[in-house]
Image (cartoon, rainbow, N blue to C red):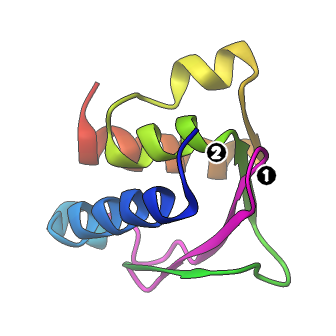
Amino acid sequence: MATHEEITESLESFARAYSENARLKVMNRDWDRNVLILAEDIESVHTMVLKDGDLSFSQGKTADPDLTVISNSDILADMFFGDITPTEPYMNGTLRIIGSEDDILRLDFISLLIWGE
């Protein structure tokens, strides 16, 4: 089981990798979204904000998320550290993403560009 702090570190790593990718920042300059990230096995809630091509995150809930990412703490930490892709846990049901199909695909594409396959 990952800790809240490990999930926070993984999100910091994800945000750093995102900000170093100029292509992603340009690609997402018109995709403003609030993403709620919930661990279902520990108390850990984060909000990732994509606005004007920039990505930031904070601890706690957003009032009106566009996407909600739910999984156990290990999968969330591994996924945002880039140790696993979201595809397998999404397909086997251990990762749930609630939102429009277009937004889910965009989030998956961002992960792919940051971490690769």
Examine the structure image and report whether residue 40 is included in the region drawn in magenta.
Answer: yes
Reply above or below: 29 against 94. below
Q: Are marks 1 and 2 in contact (CB under 8 Å)?
A: yes
What residue range appears in magenta? Answer: 27-53
Q: CA distance from mark 1 to mark 2?
A: 7 Å
Give the percent coordinates (x, y) of residue 6.
44, 57
Using the image, tell me which numbered label, if any, was put on residue 74: none
Using the image, tell me which numbered label, if any, was put on residue 104: 2
Q: Is residue 25 left or right of residue 97?
A: left
Q: Quadrant of the N terminus?
A: top right
Q: Residues within 10 Å of mark 1 (few under 14, many from 20)?
A: some
Which amino acid, by three-letter code, is at mark 1? Gly
Which amino acid, by three-letter code, is at mark 2? Ile
Please name the residue that numbered disc 1 is placed on: 99
Q: Is residue 85 left or right of residue 19?
A: right
Reply above or below: 24 against 77. below
Give the percent coordinates (x, y) of residue 43.
75, 62
Going from the N terminus, do you reach mark 1 or mark 2 first?
1
Instruction: Determine the secondary structure under disc 2.
Output: helix
Instruction: Determine the secondary structure under disc 1.
Output: loop
